[in-house]
Amino acid sequence: MGKIRYILCLLLFIQIQFAFSQSEEWDNPGSRSFKDNAIYGLIASGETLLSNVALMLFNSASGQPWAVPTTESTKGNFTRPWDWEGLDRFIVNQLGHPFQGSNYFVAGRVNGFSFYESMFFNALGSFTWEALCESQHASINDFFTTLTGAMSAGEILYRLHLEAHAAGAPLPLTFLVSPMGGFHILITNGKKTPNPGKNIYQLQTYFGGGYVKTHYSASPDNEELFSFKGGFGDIGLKVIYGDPFEQHTAIPYRHFELDINVDVNPANYNSFRVISDGYLFSFSPICNAMNALSTGLTMHLDFVSQGSYDIDMYTSTINQYSNALDWTVKYQHLFSDNSAMEIKYHAGFTFFGASNYYNPDGYRERSNNYGYGLNSKLFFGLENKKLGRLDTDVLVYALWPYSVATSLLGTTYWVFTDITYSRFVSKHFSVGSTCSLAREWGSFDNFQNTKKKNDSVKVFVAWNF
């Protein structure tokens, strides 16, 4: 979390020159001989394993009791079935592992491997970490979260790292965006780093503050487990890479959108949201002076942890994770040179998701549930250059647990609604306000149902590149 905040602060003060002129040429590197693939495969594998060693040494130096593997733990990971581990912190399991895995994925990408080929390095890094780099018994859910989530996280960070490098960002910033990408620039002196052109369609950083009210209760008596009312500070980042509406390509993530938001009150509240989508392939059946539409298959990595926390700052009231494949439509209509409407709609299948709950009889014990589900995400915007912009976002998720992954069977539902008004006050600065409503309902077999909510209002100032 600290890394993300630092990156956002740097973006407010470091002058990086972005423009938009998307090109596909750099994304088609051409074929290589078997010998070259073998050589670069060994280099990428070495960088993958090196990142595990570096993280293991860091954990060991920080004094974590599980950080140093033993002969017994390593032997057990190769002789016993791996566990579905559910008691770890939600943000560590569902966000930390995909971003740890992004280093494995980027190791493949910086060595010239394609999006799909780089999945091998995800698998290599995730397996060796679980089997060799901790004293705890290997976790099968951590392996899958890293394997699948790192595809989205890795490709997004890889492309943003290239954009930052091409725009003249200093090496420390490119390293923060993608440690593996920054390491590769360092050891090659940037000579083998492709120049992707200028693919940033929109980039916005913002900060502000607001007021929030949370509540977590369990039936049948609607017993309140914990709640919070108070102010918070807010910081965030929004990136649109590639034209959302004129996108005809078979190259994964030639267009993606990323929205990161962090709200904090040190007393007893935090909110951390990552909402993302990227085209795996797309086509544009409509493209004229007034209308533009793209549609295709998208991959999503969505993470929400928000509300009051009664255990530690890493687990909050509402916790939701979705790694999904959706069919997507993105449409823009120009009413005039000054007014436009945008509709972006996603619907599909969550192939690996997670929720989090507390035991009401001793609710300081948490558990993560892993499962599959459905999701639907609607983003609607109206903009007038004089009057401002109104955005309405509605995100809906349903999750059913894998029976082998939990003892708590049932269904969890989430609804997230954001209504935002913003207006430019200068060429780059805009101001705005957002009203957010979040709900989670848990309906379980042989267990008390739960109701959770998180409502907030905030104002913000944004810098638009």
Image: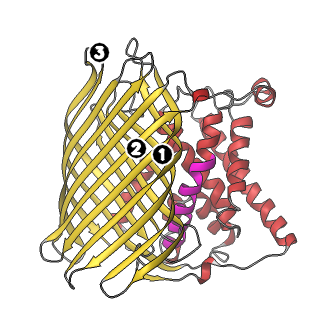
Q: Quadrant of residue 422?
A: bottom left
Q: Give the labeled residue for mark 3.
A: 220
Residue 135: where, in percent of width, then height? 69, 28
Distance from disc 1 to disc 3, alpha carbons, whole Å, reads 29 Å
Q: Give the labeled residue for mark 2.
A: 397
Give the mark nearest the N terminus, 2 or 1. 1
Question: Observer-nearest residue: 194 or 409?
Answer: 409
Q: Give the labeled residue for mark 1.
A: 322
Give the mark nearest the N terminus, 2 or 3. 3
Q: Residue furthest top?
A: 361
Q: Is residue 171 visible?
A: no
- Image height check: is 165 above or below 289? above
Question: Observer-nearest residue: 190 or 360?
Answer: 360
Q: Is residue 20 visible?
A: yes
Residue 303: where, in percent of width, then height? 43, 46
Q: Residue furthest bottom?
A: 289
Magenta-drawn segment? 147-164
- Image height check: is 145 above or below 18? above
